[in-house]
Image (tube, rainbow, N blue to C red):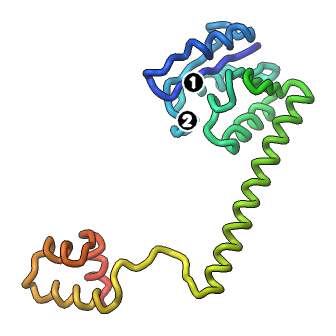
């Protein structure tokens, strides 16, 4: 059985284009589920997708109009499609002509997955090399300190003198209330 899934990001957007394409592909209206929600939300928060996933059984195929309708990142897509495959469920994306129920479709999808993994590894390598180069030049990682040690000491003395209101100190040192109390509490 073909189970359709369509999604738009906002309530102002229209699902008609996707629903028409899913109907032409053979998805019955009663087995087509929709969401009007951004993919920034976790897939478990997409009620239509959850219903479609619960209905799918071995031998069924989940059909989407385009890959980005199912997931925001390639990693998320790969995880979802691999999860379907583990259950014996196929996957079709109409726009990209991907059909994991065929050997060619599986190959294309696995190539996408391999490219995504390769890209992640390259990013990791570049980041590691960049950090090593920065350390070699004497740069330390992490967030920079907001105030120099002398200014922190001055802030603490001014706070202890009780001649200044907290708001004045915040403005003078251009810091937040949380930062002020962090420096006050750090005293030994």
Compared to residue 75, the image places residue 185 above or below, namely: below
- Real-space Cα separation, disc 1 to disc 2, in angstroms: 9 Å
Q: Residue at x 71, y 67 (%)?
A: 126
Tell me what residue is drawn at x 80 percent, y 35 percent.
Answer: 86
Q: Is residue 73 above or below residue 36?
A: below
* Crowd band around label 2 with a 10 angstrom C-alpha radius: few (<14), some (14–19), many (20+): some
Which residue is farthest left?
163
Q: Which mark is residue 39?
A: 2
Mark 1 / mark 2, whichever is N-terminal: 1
Residue 143, given in percent of the width and then of the height, sits at 46, 74
Give the residue at x 65% y 12%. Answer: 31
In the image, 160: left or right of 146? left
| 13 on left or right of 91 | left
Q: Quadrant of the C terminus?
A: bottom left
Based on the displayed image, in which of its 4 quarters is residue 172 positioned? bottom left
Closest to the observer: 155 or 59? Answer: 155
Q: Secondary structure at mark 2?
A: loop
Q: Is residue 105 above or below residue 180?
A: above
Q: Which mark is residue 64?
A: none
Instruction: State the residue at coordinates (64%, 9%).
Output: 20
In percent of width and height, residue 161 lies at 11, 89
- Are dots 1 and 2 in contact, CB under 8 Å? yes
**Of residues 155 and 55, which is closer to you in this image?**
155
Query: Whole-percent x and y of residue 74?
Result: 69, 42
Residue, disc 1: 7
């Amino acid at each position: 059985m073909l189970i359709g899934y369509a999604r738009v990001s906002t309530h102002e957007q229209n699902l008609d284009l996707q629903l028409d394409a899913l109907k032409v592909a053979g998805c019955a209206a009663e087995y087509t589920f929709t969401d009007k929600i951004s993919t920034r939300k976790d897939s478990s928060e997409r009620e239509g997708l959850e219903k479609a996933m619960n209905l799918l059984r071995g031998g069924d195929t989940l059909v989407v109009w385009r890959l980005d309708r199912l997931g925001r990142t390639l990693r998320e897509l790969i995880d979802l499609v691999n999860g379907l495959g583990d259950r014996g469920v196929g996957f079709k994306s109409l726009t990209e002509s991907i059909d994991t129920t065929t050997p060619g479709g599986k190959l294309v999808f696995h190539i996408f997955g391999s490219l995504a993994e390769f890209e992640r590894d390259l990013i990791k390598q570049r980041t590691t090399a960049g950090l090593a180069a920065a350390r070699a030049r004497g740069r330390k990682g992490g967030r920079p300190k907001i105030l120099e040690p002398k200014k922190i000491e001055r802030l603490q003395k001014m706070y202890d003198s009780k001649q200044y209101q907290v708001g004045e100190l915040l403005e003078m040192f251009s810091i937040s209330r949380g930062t002020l109390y962090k420096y006050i509490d750090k005293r030994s």
